[in-house]
Image (cartoon, helix red, strand yellow):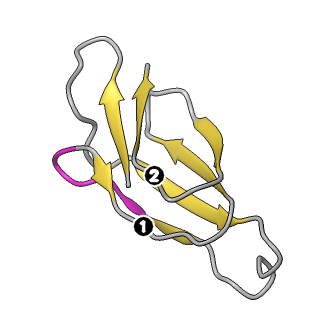
């Protein structure tokens, strides 16, 4: 799960687009996961291999990160 927070107000960012793209050996056979954050700024997904996570929302800087394990992470966007 990722949580998206505004860096200026510390409030959650609903409706941010989150795209999760697999990087491992099975990457060519797996579809990217994509969706929107909920009212709490959270987007839930499952991984079993490294992935690239891209977070974007109109008016904010796009964030791209690599996750190597299934852990929750919070991103602050401005």
In the rendered image of this protein, does residue 18 appear above or below residue 48?
Answer: above
Q: Nearer the viewer, residue 57 or 75?
A: 75
Quadrant (top left, top right, bottom left, bottom right) of the C terminus: top left
Residue 63 rendering spot, x and y as whole percentages:
58, 35
As for residue 36 lying within the magenta part, the answer is yes
Side of 23 relative to 34 (left or right)? right
SS majority, magenta: loop
Q: Which residue is mark 2?
A: 71
Badge 2, how many Cα within 10 Å: few under 14, some, many 20+?
few
Quadrant (top left, top right, bottom left, bottom right) of the N terminus: bottom left
Residue 46 rendering spot, x and y as whole percentages:
46, 70
Badge 1, how many Cα within 10 Å: few under 14, some, many 20+?
some
Q: Which mark is residue 2?
A: none
Residue 45 rendering spot, x and y as whole percentages:
42, 67
As for residue 34 lying within the magenta part, the answer is no
Q: Please report the residue visible at 83 percent of the width from the left and 77 percent of the height from the top.
A: 25
Magenta highlight range: 35-40
Side of 49 relative to 5 (left or right)? right
Q: Nearer the viewer, residue 16 or 1?
A: 1
Task: Give residue 14's quadrant in the image.
Answer: top left
Earlier sequence position, callout 1 versus callout 2: 1
Viewer-nearest of discs 1 and 2: 2
In the rendered image of this protein, does residue 53 appear above or below residue 24?
Answer: above
Q: Please report the residue visible at 51 percent of the width from the left and 44 percent of the height from the top.
A: 55
Q: Please report the residue visible at 59 percent of the width from the left and 72 percent of the height from the top.
A: 48
Residue lying farthest to the bottom in this orientation: 29
> For the residue labelled by badge 1, is the local secondary structure a helix, a strand or a loop?
loop
Side of 46 relative to 37 (left or right)? right
Q: Please report the residue visible at 78 percent of the width from the left and 70 percent of the height from the top.
A: 24
Q: Which mark is residue 45?
A: 1
């Amino acid at each position: 799960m990722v949580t998206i927070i505004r860096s200026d107000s510390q409030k959650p960012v609903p409706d941010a687009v989150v795209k999760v793209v697999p990087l491992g050996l099975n990457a060519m056979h797996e579809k990217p996961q994509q969706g929107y954050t909920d009212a709490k700024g959270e987007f839930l997904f499952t991984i079993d291999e490294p992935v690239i996570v891209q977070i974007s929302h109109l008016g904010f800087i796009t964030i791209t990160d690599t996750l190597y394990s299934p852990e929750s992470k919070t991103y602050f966007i401005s």
